[in-house]
Image: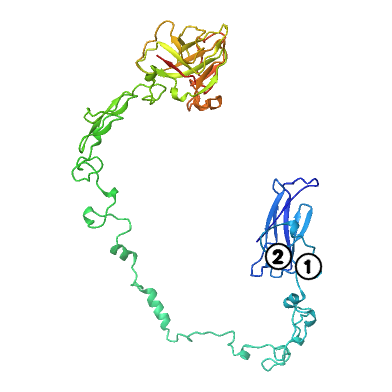
Amino acid sequence: MTTITNTVKDASGAPVSGVQVTAHLVAASGFLAGGGEIVKEVSTASAADGTWSLTLTPTESLAYPDGAYYVVSEGERRHTITVPATGEHNVADVLVSIPGVRADVGLTVTSGDARYELAARRGQPNGYAALGADGLVPTSQLPAGSGGDAVSSVNGKTGVVVLGAGDVGASTAAHTHTGAYDPAGTASSLMTSHTGAADPHPQYLTSAEGAAAYAPTAHSHAGGDITSGVLTVARLPVGTTSGTVAAGDDSRIVGAVPKSTVTTKGDLLAATGNATVARLGVGSDGQVLTADAAQTSGLKWADPPSGGGGSGGGPVYPLSAYGLLAASGDPETFMLGSGASANTILGSRMEIPAGVTITRLWAAVRAGGTYAASAVPNRLGLYTDEGVLVAATADDSTLWTAAGWRGGALVGGPIAAQSTPRMVYILLIFGGMSDLVMPYPASANDAQSSWFCRGPSASGPRRAFYTGAGGGGLPSSFNPASYGTETTYLSLVGVT
């Protein structure tokens, strides 16, 4: 097959898309030289850049290629082309003039003589017969003795001949065959004897004989009747008493552990020695399973070790190495910085482990800023997870003027420890500051807050937020679900 291509353009030379392109084969033969009929017409449409391509049968592959050509239509435009044997060709490279009359049918004199009979030979010797007006071959063109001559007589009769039964050796219409084929009546007697017999076919079982000789499809057997084969599990008498088959945790199975060993949801089976299994009772909520060689089973339930930022056992370099009891994240991940606008409030949610007394609040500063007189304070505030102010540090205009951990003691004294972990918010406020840069996690931006600030429920307290409404200082309370703008610019804050 050969590919023909072109580009459809308008009068200005600009490409035109969506133009219907059709290639139609004009030839006396629609067949290939090697056999098989070809598709005479194919279509496509020009692409966005005006280009199109069609795969066509090469002209020379036709049984009679002489004078054959394709007409390619591009909308209102027409091109007459021949198709080379192989390759890809542009329409302009294969254009031809429309052939003359003889070429229109794709025949040369030689190929025409080989395919058609000359009209002059019709009804002539060594030619072909001519049909009459009745669609039959005239008798004059039939050979002598072929039945084309007139009938002179029928069975020795002439004129309008009507043949009777006797003329052709047939019996008369009124006759019978009684006794002609069974003169002794033997067949009739045998049929009477057969149909009257009590069991005319003894080789076959009657219903009664079959029921007596064979069991019906649906039947049952006593257990003792089954002496071979394999029974399905459903046929086995499974149980825990005498005469039943043991299964599951039946104590009759060597090494089986009865399910009664565990008694409470969450109980585990633990090895207390070689081939010895015992119950390990479930621990309390929040506890984790810990290896302990001092225990009989080598395991115990224990409270997880304290750590900051929700990291379980804490980062490789723990918060305690910084002297912090808890923080909003691992300082190692806060390697980017962003300027903090004057009079802005930033909020971060974090966990305070059980047993931690909060004495001071701290915030990390990447580059200190410059303070100008402002009515807006500079301080940190501690809030409950419901957004209620618990305590705050003193207002300090130098608080954000140097890099490092910046903060101070809570006014009013420490906040007592609790027996369970608790979530809190720490809010920062910047009053009259310029050129202040705070550290943030990598690639922080507001667009990622949809999964950073909230869980799957997409409601409730948020991880981090900011607001420019700091003119009145820190709020006495706020709604953790809607206050300010969600963000991934999480402040690095901590407590000691």
Residue furthest bottom as drawn: 156
Instruction: Give the distance between the C-alpha atoms of the residues marked 2 and 1, in whole angstroms.
Output: 14 Å
Q: Are marks 2 and 1 in contact (CB under 8 Å)?
A: no
Where, by quadrant of the figure, is residue 80 drawn?
bottom right
Nearer to the camera, 33 or 197: 33
Label annotation for residue 59 = 2
Nearer to the camera, 192 or 40: 40
- Quadrant where the N terminus is found in the figure: bottom right
Q: Report the residue marked by disc 1.
A: 104
Q: Can residue 386 be seen? A: no
Q: Amino acid at mark 2?
A: Thr
Where, by quadrant of the figure, is residue 182 drawn?
bottom left
Q: Secondary structure at mark 1?
A: helix
Q: Residue at x 26, y 34 (%)?
A: 269
Residue 165 percent coordinates (x, y): 62, 88
| Residue 23 in the image: above or below residue 277 | below
Q: Amino acid at mark 1?
A: Asp
Residue 489 percent coordinates (x, y): 52, 22
Q: Can residue 348 be seen? A: yes
Mark toward the viewer: 2 or 1: 2
Q: Decide if residue 39 is on the left or right side of residue 477.
A: right
Q: Secondary structure at mark 2?
A: helix
Q: Residue at x 76, y 68 (%)?
A: 67
| Residue 73 in the image: above or below residue 493 | below
Residue 9 percent coordinates (x, y): 76, 48
Q: Decide if residue 104 is on the left or right side of residue 315.
A: right
Task: Say few, some or many: other residues with alpha carbon within 10 Å of mark 2 (under 14 / 14 to 19 / 20 or more).
Answer: many
Q: Earlier in the sequence, mark 2 or mark 1?
A: 2
| Residue 273 in the image: above or below residue 51 | above
Task: Say few, some or many: other residues with alpha carbon within 10 Å of mark 1 (under 14 / 14 to 19 / 20 or more).
Answer: some
Nearer to the camera, 394 or 240: 394
